[in-house]
Amino acid sequence: MYVIYNPTHVRHDPPYEIYDGVRAPYAETAARAEAIIARLRQDSSYRITRPRHFPLAWRRRIHHPRYIRFLRERSGQLGEAEALNPSYFITDTYAPIVQHTYRVAGQAVDVALTAADKLLQGENPVYALCRPPGHHAEHLSMGGYCYFNNAAIAAEYLSKHGRVAVLDIDFHHGNGTQHSFYERSDVLYVSLHADPQVRYPYISGFEEEKGRGQGHGFTRNYPLRLGTTDAEYLGTLRNALRCIASFVPDYLIVSAGFDTYAHDPIGGFALTVPCYQAIGQAIAGLNIPTVAIQEGGYCVPALGDIAYAFLQGLQGKNL
Ligand code: OKP
Ligand code: ZN
């Protein structure tokens, strides 16, 4: 299968995040994507390919021009070792800007769009190894390690060619993706995540959120308890997949976060590595052309094996 990857992501490397006013090491490290690509390189059936550049107009279909300009200008003003924690255009304290943030975040959008394009050319499944992630990025704001919403932009791109479902399996609710399509009936957003009452992003991902206006019924949230096990997760996933199947999408985007893993330092579920093969296989059972887009996952020593298990499953293969 095709893996779209751009090694220049390493240049977006903020030194710290801020949790309740206190500095902590930045969890969304370059080592995450490097661990995944190193594992995939061990299997020659994974065809690792650089992205091509797409017109900036695609970003503007999801993000406000003022927000994009803010990110570009502020990145451009920073020196090599500087980090800016902006006061505006941000929903929390988890998305500092460094010198190369604008460029690298834009390249992650190209990774997602190149993968979507491969899907249109008949490749299936396709994996976009995006970094930084995107599902918390909103129309007018960054947050949660996310700057441009790679999955939302890819969904918007594919929606010109058919009905699109987004399945978000990151531990955290994808507030940015949900809001991008909240009033639309041509893009379905379905998410499994930690109960937002007790985990980030706190403000969205509740079961009652179902879409608005024409979009009513086209958002579906499955909040799960902390400590969720393989069996519980797979049971809920089956319900989510039924919801997706009844929408009859032409394309499926999976916001693939691996912070549901038992030993993830940020997450709080109990999933094991083999469960990711089962998740991938269950998704493959839908038989819908699928692009997986990388979101979170912070247990660096396990990320290679988790991603490999998931992608093998997505191809209907065993470990
Ligand atoms: C981004 B993604 C750790 C708190 C972490 C930020 C979470 C961002 C998650 N002290 N809060 O969805 O993986
Ligand atoms: Zn996450």
Image (tube, rainbow, N blue to C red):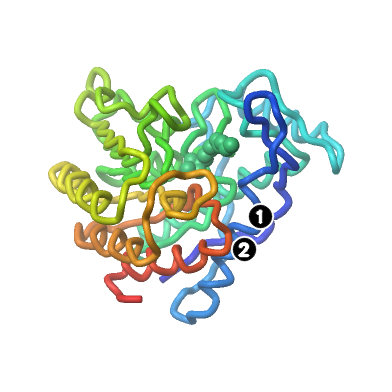
Disc 2 packing (10 Å; few <14; some 14–19; many ≥20): some
> Which residue was labeled with disc 2?
34
Depth check, front residue: 35 or 285: 35
Depth check, front residue: 90 or 298: 298
Q: Residue at 43% of width from left, 44% of height from top? A: 268
Depth check, front residue: 304 or 283: 304
Q: Residue at 52% of width from left, 44% of height from top? A: 266
Q: Residue at 61% of width from left, 22% of height from top? A: 89
Label 2 beta carbon less than 8 Å to ligand 1: no
Instruction: From the viewer's perspective, tell me whether residue 45 is left or right of residue 143.
Output: left
Report which quarter residue 225 is drawn in. Answer: top left
> Which residue was labeled with disc 1?
30
Amino acid carrying label 2: it is: Glu
Disc 2 from disc 1: Cα separation: 6 Å
Q: Are marks 2 and 1 in contact (CB under 8 Å)?
A: yes
Instruction: From the viewer's perspective, tell me whether residue 289 is left or right of residue 295.
Output: left
Amino acid carrying label 1: it is: Ala
Establish if 131 lies above or below 136.
Answer: below
Label 1 element class: helix
**Label drawn at residue 64:** none
Which residue is most to the front? 227
Label 2 element class: helix
Q: Position of residue 16 (x, y in %)?
A: 72, 39
Q: Residue at 22% of width from left, 46% of height from top? A: 236
Disc 1 packing (10 Å; few <14; some 14–19; many ≥20): some
- Looking at the rendered image, the quarter that the C terminus falls into is bottom left
Whether residue 150 is visible, yes or no, is no
Which residue is most to the left? 246
- Looking at the rendered image, the quarter that the N terminus falls into is bottom left
Establish if 222 lies above or below 312.
Answer: above
Establish if 258 lies above or below 16.
Answer: below
